[in-house]
Image (cartoon, rainbow, N blue to C red):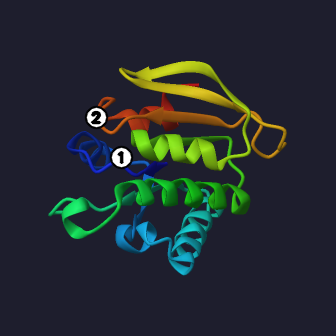
Amino acid sequence: MLAGSLSPVTARQVAAARSFDTVWLDASAMAQRDAATLERHARDIANGLASGRNVLACTRPLNPLPAERGIDAQALARAGGELLARVLTLAPLQRVGIAGGDTSSHAVQAFDAWGLSYVADIGAGTSLCRVHSDDAALDGLEIMLKGGQMGSDDVFERLVHGAS
């Protein structure tokens, strides 16, 4: 699960996620596209997945807001997509979730995918899709996409336990 959104709704969803180990992402370094930081985060996430755990990678709520701290939100969203693509090369998965509209769109663009198809609703404004790709490692990957202000507080738990 990658939570790139800094919305209050996503913050509640992160707080309600009980079935996950959390990896806190360095938003400033990621937005600057620091390769060492992206690699460290990717390995931390992959190590957690390799141990059989669900992993929730997320940025900490920032106060003041990212723009007020000099963080380019679009650069951070692109870095989130790059991070997820790197994680999938280290730890192939069957299902992944992405919270944040910009993060979702950049993550999908970072994949070698030619299409998505609808699988199921996980809740209001939250869809589970299937990735279609010529890359056998990505083809068939289930991916939850949701905007930051969308979904119930338990949406991350529903991704793991409720929707198939």
Q: Residue at x 41, y 39 (%)?
A: 101
As drawn, 98 above or below 162 = below
Q: Which mark is residue 92?
A: none
The kind of secondary structure element at disc 2 is loop
The kind of secondary structure element at disc 1 is loop
Residue 158, image quadrant: top left
How many numbered marks are there?
2
Q: Residue at x 66, y 29 (%)?
A: 130
Nearer the observer, 132 or 76: 76
As drawn, 156 above or below 64 = above
Which image quarter is the C terminus in?
Answer: top right
Q: Residue furthest bottom?
A: 36
Which amino acid, mark 1? Ala
> Between tags 2 and 1, which lies in front?
2
Q: Badge 2: how crowded within 10 Å, few (<14), some, or many (20+)? A: some
Residue 23 placed where, x, y %?
43, 65
Nearer the observer, 3 or 159: 3
Residue carrying label 2: 149
Residue 84, image quadrant: bottom right
Residue carrying label 1: 17
Residue 64, image quadrant: bottom left
